[in-house]
Amino acid sequence: MEGRRRVLKAALAAGTLLHTRFSLADAVQHVSPVRFAVPAGACDCHTHIHGDPAKFPFFSGRVYTPEMATPEQMLALHKALGIQRVVIVTPSVYGTDNAATLWGMQARGRDARGVAVIDEKTSEAELDSMHKAGVRGIRLNLTTGGTNDPDIARKRFEDALTRVKHRKWHIQFNTRPPMIAALKDALAASPVPLVFDHFGGARPELGVQQPGFYELAELVHSGKAYVKISVGSGPRDTYAGYAPLARALIAANPARILWGTNWPHPNTGSSRNPTEVTPLMQVDNGLVFNLLPMWAPDATLRNRILVKNPARLYEF
């Protein structure tokens, strides 16, 4: 196994993109049995597809290189979890190339929706085509893209609005609470729905008093924004720190809560060379899914989070 890994890393460093069978094993992660009744039509609202680099080349300006994660592996995970629907989000490693996301969506048919990444070069015809394929929003990768200046983030948000407001798409943010606080007035005035990844980037060890979390909860409470209560980091000894964050956001507005796995759990924070393959983090997705009844004990509430909210936002 290690020998194969070294071969692939060497090939990537040399610019030769190869397909190797070991990559197909790493995205297949352990899934503990689900201990609650998953409602029909449940949706995993945050996943990624990493295709064969020979067919889906990575963005040259990426900050990490993930292992492969295919639609077949994703479907196996969702069968184990009892989840029917999925939202596939274009990861930062593809820049504005959404081909792998569209490939994954096509594999799941009517049970899939997508969130794309675009720029000023993305034509209206491309957006029309993506809408027909099931794309319902665009993502601003502020954190992964290294955008820490609120003025730059505000400009990117304004540019995104001009592209999607007539389409009734949403804008999804990969960012952190202090940035949400810095942009709160512009976000509150948004003519389109907003979606925040991974608890809005809130850190579980800092609790509900951390800077910017109140502003995030305000946007959720107002109905302006959705937030994904998806654990964005790798495996942990304890997930207890997420409970106060999840409960506070659910209490703010249960109609604006989404859930997602973040499969296949790419290691975006690695200090490796960006072109060196970073192993996927091995997360027990069943264990994490079983946290949801602790955050939302009522079955009707879980149905809203898993079924009704995604159906409304993504037009299932």
Image (tube, rainbow, N blue to C red):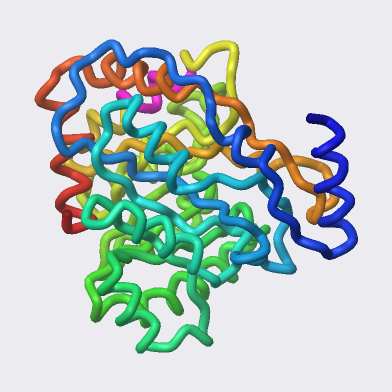
Q: Quadrant of the C terminus?
A: bottom left
Q: Return the x and y of residue 19 as percentages of the image width and height.
A: 69, 53
Q: Main secondary structure of the magenta part?
A: helix
Tell me: 201 left or right of 56: left
For the point 60% across and 26% down, the residue is: 282
Tell me: 153 left or right of 144: left
Q: Is residue 242 magenta?
A: yes
Which one is nearer the viewer's eye here, 56 or 209? 56
Magenta-tinted stretch: 241-247
Q: Is residue 185 visible?
A: no
User: Compared to 34, does 143 lie above or below?
Assistant: below
Q: Is residue 84 visible?
A: yes
Which one is nearer the viewer's eye here, 151 or 103? 103
For the point 23% across and 43% down, the residue is: 256
Tell me: 298 left or right of 279: left
For the point 37% across and 63% down, the residue is: 171
Quarter assignment of residue 242 = top left
Tell me: 274 left or right of 72: right
Q: Return the x and y of residue 46 as percentages of the image width and height.
A: 40, 45
Q: Residue furthest left?
A: 300
Q: Quadrant of the N terminus?
A: top right
Q: Is residue 168 magenta?
A: no
For the point 50% across and 62% down, the residue is: 100
User: Compared to 167, does 260 lie above or below?
Assistant: above
Q: Return the x and y of residue 193 as percentages of the image width and height.
A: 27, 60
Q: Return the x and y of residue 144 as percentages of the image width and height.
A: 63, 53
